[in-house]
Structures are given as C-alpha cells and as structure tokens.
Amino acid sequence: MIWDLQTVFYDRVNIDCWAQSIVPNFVTSNCFIGHAYTRALLGFIRDWYLRSPAAAPDEPIYIIEVGVGHGKMSFHMMNALTRLREYWPRGVARPFVYVMTDFTQNNVDFWRAHPSFQAWMEEGILDMALFDADNSASIKLQVSGKELGVGSCANPVLAICNYIFDTLRQDAFRIVDEQLQEALIGVQSPREEPEAVHPDVIARMRCYWEYRDCKPEIYENKAMQAVLKAYLAQNRNMSILIPVGGIGVINRLATLSNGRVMLLAGDKAYNHDMSLAGLRDPHIAKHGSFSFMVNFDAVRLNVVSRGGFSLRTPYLDGFKCSAFCIGCGKPSAYPELRVAWKDYFMRFGPENFSTLQRCVKDESGDASLKTALTVLRLSRYDSDIFFKFRSVFVQRAPEASEKLIADTVRDLKLMYANYYPLQKNKDIGFELAHLLMTLHMYEEAVQYFKNSQRDCGEHYISWYNMGICYHYLEEPVEALKCFTTVLELQPNYHDAVGWKRRAALAVQELEKTKAREAAGGDAGGVTEADVELHVGGEGGSAGAGTGVGDGAGAGAGAGAGAGAGSGAADATEASGSLPNGTGVVESAASHGAAPVGDGSGDLVDVQL
C-alpha cells in the first residue's frame, strides 16, 4: 500500500509538486550539479567514442534521465552540454540524445510545451518519453518516434537518477547477532480514510515495523544474494536498506544496450557500510510524498559482483553522488570520466556547494556585492542564487564602480540564460529588470519586464515600471500605453493616475511639436488643462517622485512609497532613487578538451 500512495501522489499532483515548492529540488536541480554531471557524462562520451573499439560513431549515446519531474535539471544539463559543443568527440555527427522521462504523461506534455526545450528538440538532441521505473521494458520516444527496446542501442546507455532511488521501492533488513531478519511495515491512519490510497494519507500515516528471520536466498537473484552475504560476513549488527527499485532501473536500462549502462545517482544516501552499523527502524521522511535513505553501498556491491565498477566519494554526511557502470569494461578505460569525478565530486562537489551558498546567505549578515557575485559565479550562474541575493544586488550595485557594475550586468545576463521558468513566486525577469532600473538601464529593463510577463503572467506593477522606464527613455507614447494598462488592471492605483496625466501631457507636446515642424511655425505649447480631456478627469496629481510600486500616498518629489513585486506579494519599503527623485522599491517574493590523468586517488570499486 505504501508504494501505491507514492505513485498516486506524483500522478495526481505532477508539476505542482515543484511549482508550489511542495517537494524540495534545489540540491539536485541547480547549475552547479548540472555542470558536474555534464563533465562526468562528457568524459564518458569522449572516452567511449575516442578510445573504445566497440564504439558506433554513426549512432548516438542515449542519456536517459529517470523521473525528471519539473524538467529543471534537464534544462541545466542540456545548457551545459551544448555550451561544451566544441569538446564533443570529433567524427561523431550526433554524440548523444538526451531523453527526459517520467511515468505520467502530464509531465511529458508540460516539457514538450515549455519554450526552453524547443530548439534542442528541433536539433534532434533532445527527446521525451514515458518510463515507469518499476515496470517499463522499453522506451517510446515521443519526439522522434523511435522506440528503444531490448538491444536497440548500439552504444552504452547513460542514465541520471536524482532524488529517484529514495522514492522507489526498498527492502529492509537487519542483522542481529549474525541472524538476518526481514523488516515488514504496517501503515495506520488516526482516522477512517474514505479513500485508502489518496495522496493526503501520506501526511497522516503512521508506520510500524516487525521483523522475522530469513536467509539471503530470500532473493532468487545471485547478485542480490551476494549483497546480503557480504553484509553477513562482517559479523556485526546492522540495519540495511536494499534499493530494489533503483537496482531494477539499472537492470532495465542495461537491457537496451546489451547489458551496458552507466548511471549517475544523487540522493540522501549511505555511501559506505560503516553508516549501516547499529539497529534501528528505517526512517521515512515526509515532504508531500515520502522518501527513505538510499544504500548506495548495496548498489555498489551488486554492480561489482556482476563485473562492473563504481565511483563514489569518501564522505559520510550530506547529499551523496555515485556512478555505477556495468558491461563497459574496466575503469582504466575511462580516464576523462575519472578525472571529471575527482574534480567535480571528490574535491568540491554538489553537497559542498549547496552548504556553502546557504552558509554565505544565512551566516554572512550584510554581504557585499563582490561576495554575492562570487557565489553566483561559483554556482555557474544559477538563477536561484541570484534570487537569494537579489536584495544585495539591488542595494549594492548602484554604489559600485563602473567596472564592477559592468561585471555585475554581464554576470546577471549569463544567469538569466540559465533561468527555467517554473515557480511564479520566483520571477527572475522582474527582479533583474528591477535591478537594471536602479542602474538607469531603462531600455534593457523594459525587455526583462516583458519577459517577466511572458513567463510569470501579466501584472500591473510590471506595466507601471515599464511606463516609468519609457518616461526616462523619452518615449511618451509607450509610457502612456503602459500607465493606461495599469489603470485598466488596477483602477484605484493613485500613482499611475499622476504618471498617466504626465505622459499624456508629453504626448500632446510631442504631437504639437511634430505639427509645428510640419507647418514650419509655432503651434503653441501644451498646458495641464489640455490633458484633462485625455485622462478623463481621473483626479490625482502628477508627482515626479512617486514610488515605483504599489505606493500609497505618494507625494510629488518625495521618492518614497510602498511597493509590491510581481506576484502581488507584501509591500516593502522604497530604496534607492532614480533621477528626479523617483523611488525604486525592492519587490517582495516576486512574482578546451577535458584533462586526462591517471585517476589515482579516486574511489573506484571493481571486482578483482
């Protein structure tokens, strides 16, 4: 029953799990981990095509991401892979096809419609498919129409599983005084459930455990028996989880390429058997869905018993990454893969980055602009990092030197290229436009406000800010259109009334100037009274200093007002100022070939 609850949760809630931040995703869906995985995958691809006599250069390597969910990791991976195009192996027309998979068609439909993926689909290097990690024996690609079946792939299959193994089926055991025991789970609810298998039950369920004696032969599979026997041979009490669902994914994907697969996995996991010591019930974490810890050490034992090898890190705490390779030869045949592993996982990996960025934000207090830029660059220009430090950028950038401002704008444009619109309360376009306004870069700010409306929906604050930008760009016609739209969306927005009056005055002045030039004479000036006909007597007075935002009680030249970011969040104080005292508010919760080395020092597990 517990696994049926999991399946129903993801099938019913689908993309909303992540768009509404129900399920956490930053650790496994940021630019840093995307780049790290890309370097490992590209290392394998280069090693295979350039060094393996079994390589088929006329056929691509299929990179299959399992349980894609929102698609953000796929986006970062594709960005990183295509930016390293010059390092793709020469003589190979199409070295890879990246395949996004999930078990629900709703998610696949969301990706296919997402604008971030269109160019790669047209190029033929990105495809999408349904894949049930528990049952699928083949993969039908929905863009190209090709079916990946048993033995259909001429080259090894590469796979990515991020926060996947922890949500798939697990078996639990413990060893008590050298006796192996199987764990059995019971599920209760504190109330009568009209629908036993409903996603809401997860939050209420209470689990209890019972144990009964068993032997390694509880598994028919010899490799699975070998895992349990290896733990029994240690002669100590242990609590063991066996990720049978994850191992099943490896087995199913291996059949597509005659038993050849390398899988990269990232999860909350045990990388070493010392973490299994002691007796305890398995822990179930609830976060909308639920998850278990993952025993990567058991996966390693399974893979090594079958003649494969694994790559892991030496760390016991935090988020873990491992690579498992079957049927592709010895690790010595993959020098670029192993160098990438040492550089991007062993020395400073995804867990280290996640911890560092969180500490800098939470523990540094009043961070400097250079500090924020350093973390942004280390992240490989991740938009979530910009969002976390957005107040630093807005407050510090206007005070910076010209050179530092130029560097900041450059870096933020690189960041925006990595933005994957998903959560409307993280409106990166609006936040970047807001910053550009504080730097008086009005033309560029307008474009990002437009992007904000395209990605996160129309909002009167964006129209209002664009109107002010057009005012300082001396484009009164566009400014008037913007302020008119503001009042259509928010008729009682007092600040917009004054700005609309001011824009209408400028438009009439412009028209009279054109008429005067055409007639070669003086057509007379425009007065405040002339504008009454255009604004319909809406009241209010034009104030040069009204706040950029949802200001209440803005006064002429005051430059202060309360404002709300895109997404209609709570108002915040105005900060900074534009020319003529126009306040700018901070929005609140707005809407080279790879080197080759000897690989010494990496943790490689191989059957001797």
Image: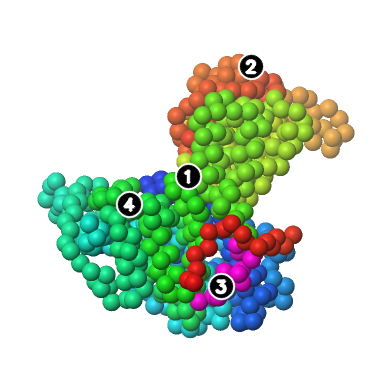
- Residue 515 position by quadrant: top right
Q: Secondary structure at mark 1?
A: loop
4 or 1: mark nearer the eye: 4
Q: Mark 2 packing: few (<14 Cα in 10 Å), some, or many (20+)?
A: some
Lower sequence index among marks 2 and 1: 1
Lower sequence index among marks 3 and 4: 4
Tell me if residue 526 is in the magenta stretch: no
Whether residue 501 appears in this view of the structure is no
Give the magenta-colored segment's residue range. 327-338
Whether residue 50 appears in this view of the structure is yes
Lower sequence index among marks 2 and 3: 3
Horizontal placement of 607 versus 16: left or right? right
Looking at the picture, tell me which residue is in the foreground, 282 or 124: 282
Lower sequence index among marks 3 and 1: 3
**Residue beneath disc 4:** 277
- Provide residue 420's location: percent of width, then percent of height: 54, 51
CA gap between label 2 and label 1 equals 33 Å
**Residue beneath disc 3:** 330
Which mark, by number, is residue 424? 1
- Provide residue 247's location: percent of width, then percent of height: 38, 68
